[in-house]
Image: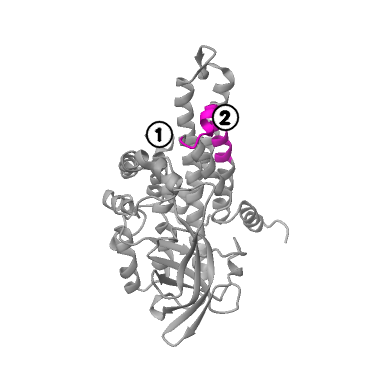
Amino acid sequence: MLDPFFSKFLDESHRLYYDNCLRFAREEIAPYVYEWEEAELFPRELYYKAAEAGVLGVWFPEEYGGGGGDIFHAIVEIEALIRGGSTGVLVGLGSLGIAVPPILLLGTEEQKQRWIPPTMKGEFVAALGITEPGTGSDVAGIRTRAVRDGDSYVLNGSKLYITSGARADYVVTLARTDDDPHGGLTFFVVEAGTPGFSASKTLKKMGWRASDTAELSFEDCRVPVENRLGDEGTGFLAVMNNFQSERMALAAYGHASAEFALEESERYVREREAFGRPIVGFQVTRHKLAQMSTQVRAMKCFNYQVADAIRRGEDVVEAVSQAKNFSAEASMQVCHQAVQLFGGMGYMRETVVERLFRDVRLLSIGGGTTEIMNEIICRVRGYGR
């Protein structure tokens, strides 16, 4: 159930969509999540089921098969689907959320029709290829190079930490077409099966285990010119645009994970007894819950305010960076306390709070580290140089 405290941001379509996503989480994810976490992969069939249930690509335009929703449809989707018990499943299903925007922003109509509708139907799995070994958050340092050769580009390089990279049907890949650090970057759609392109390694992770994460390799990989998105040199601005929505999503993962951990903790402390009474009867337990609930509400208030500004078309570069940092830290604190309240059971992999605790650790790394976010905030506010 959605918190009525935030009702001013939501309408009936958001509430109905949340209920639909919650049903999907409980019926199609929760019963199998432990098995998928242990296997470090969920079935590809889940993409089709998610599309059929209407929980795939809700925020993309209807003319390309999306749901035509706004940013709050995306947020309530995260809040509902997290109750399936695995962030890894969510980010695997949601990798289209970072892969499709460059196509939508830079692509021709033919390119949009070629790749976006099948992705919305769950027929294609999409991934975004930006991060490289040694570059991390430094997009300007990308070394994967694309050299024009007739009606093709020849790509050489590698990408790292690519969500859904192991089984993606296409990877929206950022490569260098010129030596200019910012103006020399261009997006290409590299399709699975292209000679010279491979998922060279599937990576083992602390958290987000049910999502496949890969290292990608490009060795004299010949990509047709018609797979280039936009003109040469347009990639950097598209990346910056992409980062804002990705960082907002990661902030939402923070408050959604913490909220679920709080709910699980509230349930457990009423059931678990110590010294002849439920542990909720101890003041120290109640005070932990009070602090956790305060942190959850603070995160949601901040994130909803920023999301509302995005919906109104405002500049939120600073606010998104702050929201991501705040959610990353606060959600880690809440999930830490949830594990503490569960005691020994909280340390077991079968317990959802253990999973949430591991999963939220990535929030201060993904989409730009906390340190990078702080630097962005400093620059916007005019601190230092």
| Residue that appears at 68% across and 57% down | 382
Q: Which residue is mark 1?
A: 4
Badge 1 density bin: few <14, some 14–19, many ≥20, Cα 10 Å = few
Residue type, numbered disc 2: Gln
Q: Is residue 136 left or right of residue 104?
A: right
| Colour scheme of the rendered structure | one colour
Q: CA distance from mark 2 to mark 1?
A: 29 Å
Q: Residue furthest right?
A: 384
Please tell me whether residue 344 belongs to the stretch shown in magenta. yes
Occupied quadrant, residue 318 = bottom right
- The boundaries of the magenta stretch are 330-350
Q: Secondary structure at mark 2?
A: helix
Q: Secondary structure at mark 1?
A: helix
Q: Which residue is mark 2?
A: 340
- Expressed as whole percent of the image width and height from the top left, the position of residue 323 reads 55, 47
Q: Nearer the viewer, residue 299 or 305?
A: 299
Q: Quadrant of the N terminus?
A: top left
Q: Nearer the viewer, residue 36 or 320?
A: 36
Q: Is residue 376 left or right of residue 2?
A: right
